[in-house]
Amino acid sequence: MGRAQVKRRGEHDVAHRRPETAARPRPEQGVPELDPLIHERIRLGIVSALAVNQRLSFNELKRLLNTTDGNLSVHARKLEEAGYLGCDKYFEGRVPKTEYWLTAAGRKSLQRYLDRMEEIIRATREA
């Protein structure tokens, strides 16, 4: 009795599950790679905000992205080390200020990322 129930339950589960191939695109289907440096949520927010603003201060980015000082600092540093962001640090009176801007390499990488996302969206809609 127990075996029959397990078998039926297994058959039922299989019958109602979506096939694995429909759930996830496979690399051999030509799904483009996304830049992992930009793909992370906070970093994508940083480069997107800077793509439409010439310069933004650390505090402006922090408010826009609703994140902490430490989180923004770590992600901005990674983008800066990759050459995607430029950074100026200076003092206004005794108050330290940090401003960021998107470099030409950062703009190019963001455009490539957006192009790949559009390819994925187009392929998904056609499927």
Image (cartoon, rainbow, N blue to C red):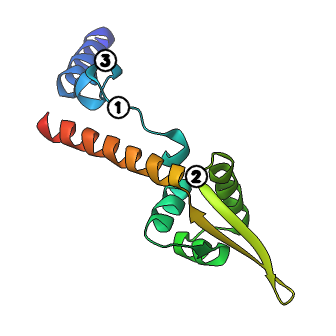
Residue located 84% across and 90% down the image: 93
Q: Position of residue 81 (x, y in %)?
A: 69, 48
Residue located 65% across and 77% down the image: 59
Image vertical order of residue 3 relative to residue 113, above or below: above
* Mark pair 2, 1: CA separation: 21 Å
Q: Position of residue 11 (x, y in %)?
A: 21, 17
Q: Quadrant of the C terminus?
A: top left
**Residue at the far bottom in the pictured view:** 93
Give SS at disc 1: loop
**In this rendering, the label closer to the viewer, 2 or 1:** 2
From the image, tell me which residue sits under label 3: 28
Nearest to the observer: residue 21 or residue 95: 95
Whether residue 117 is visible, yes or no, is yes
**In this rendering, the label closer to the viewer, 3 or 1:** 1
* Mark pair 3, 1: CA separation: 10 Å
Mark 3 Cα shell of 10 Å, populated few (<14), some (14-19), many (≥20):
few
Image vertical order of residue 37 relative to residue 66, above or below: above
* Mark pair 3, 2: CA separation: 30 Å
Q: Position of residue 36 (x, y in %)?
A: 52, 40
Mark 3 or mark 2: whose residue is earlier in sequence = 3
From the image, tell me which residue sits under label 1: 32
Specify the amino acid type for callout 3. Answer: Glu
Residue 74 image-quadrant placement: bottom right
Mark 2 or mark 1: whose residue is earlier in sequence = 1
Give SS at disc 2: loop
Q: Which label number is shown at residue 84?
A: 2
Residue 19 image-quadrant placement: top left
Q: Position of residue 58 (x, y in %)?
A: 66, 72
